[in-house]
Image: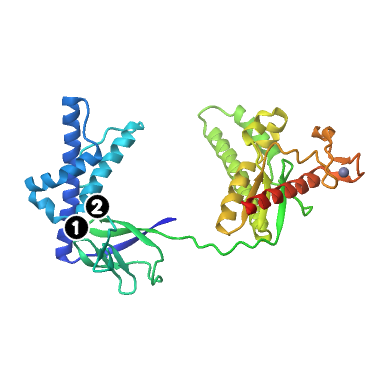
Amino acid sequence: MLKAYVFRLYPDNNQKQMINQTIGNSRFIYNYFLNDKITEYKKFKKSKTAYDQIKCIPSLIENYPWLKQSDSCALRNSIFNLDDAYKSFYNGKGYPKFKNKDKYNSYKTNNMKSIYKGKQYESIKLDLINKIIILPKLKEVKIRGYRKLNKINGIIKSAVIRKEAKKYYVSVLIEEELIKPIFNPKNIVGLDLGIKDLVITSNHEKIENKVKSYNKRLKGLQKALSRAKVGSNNRYKIKLKIQRIYQKIKNARKHLIHNITNKIIKENDIIITENLDIKNMYQNHNIAKSLTNTPLGHLIRILKYKSEWQNKKLIQVDRYYPSSQICSKCGYKNEKVKDLTIRKWECPRCNTKHDRDYNASENILFEGIKLYMEQLQV
Ligand SMILES: [Zn+2]
């Protein structure tokens, strides 16, 4: 996981001059090679790659000796910046532009590792206790920020030094390791996801999709809207009211989904759901109407990221697994249950009486456990 930490930088006068110079030199390199690319392309219909340009830097330094004073990493990164600008141009963005002082106010340097007399050195070092960062060419610079942190665990990848309104900042990119405790599952749940009841669990819980719909009020407002004069103040007010209601419904839905997912993640270690084809469900006309109010895709996405963060496991069973038709007691497959209107049925083989949704969630649970065990054996 990459994370950026931004500190205010307090360079002394010499360091300020050095930073300004390096930013200026990086901008020079950017503009120089942009010009180079344009002229080469005009002449030969092709131009140098970023790597060819990097190879040109030493000869460029001979002609412009002041380039030597700056961090060489910064010059190379400036070429990569230009390369990125070309890449976004090929993806439909505007053609790269020459940069003036306002548009180019930073430079990037990478943390270079080297070994000298058996000791490892890094070009960027962060000392949060003494509030110091060591940067190439600048050496120790005072910093401020993250008062409560003594140390950041992780590997420093790079730093961007930026000058903004006469103030200096450094953004340090750090690769942090996400340390997960050993996974030791105790509680497992199967979830059948639905329309009226959003979630039906294998523990025989039903969680209703009970968000107030304001249907009556919306209908009334729509009617009033159609009668209101176009461009009138009244029409504007009605529109605003409608927008507010939709906002209310949206918020309530968000709230409901967060509550449901928090509860499920808190109570269980392995969560098993169907891998629903939401798009396909929309195409099924009967379901489509009620599904527009059902945020199932959203619910699955949230379950996914929450389980990842909290060291839980989300398993999704194949969407074609007939969870509703199989008897969770004896395994008999009852094709008649395909009919969605059948809410309760009795197994012709073992005579168990089933609630359609509870039975489905139990089957999803079994199927998920099977998948989990298969994963363990690999
Ligand atoms: Zn049965």
Residue 346 visible in the shown view: yes
Q: Nearer the viewer, residue 311 or 141?
A: 311
Residue 197, position as x, y percentages in the image: 74, 45
| Badge 2 element | strand
Residue at 69 percent across and 29 percent down: it is 284
Q: Which residue is mark 1?
A: 19
Image x and y of residue 129, in percent: 34, 74
Q: Is residue 36 left or right of residue 113?
A: left
Specify the label residue 372 is tagged with. none
Is residue 164 or residue 329 the one in the foreground? 329
In the rendered image, which quarter is residue 112 located in?
bottom left
Residue at 23% x, 50% y is 105
| 331, above or below 41, in the image | below
The x and y percentages for residue 269 are: 66, 58
Q: How far separated are the C-alphas under marks 2 and 1? A: 9 Å
Q: Amino acid at mark 1?
A: Ile
Evaluate if marks 2 and 1 touch, with contact meaning CB atoms under 8 Å apart. Answer: yes
User: Whole-percent x and y of residue 192?
Assistant: 73, 45
**Circle 2 residue:** 107
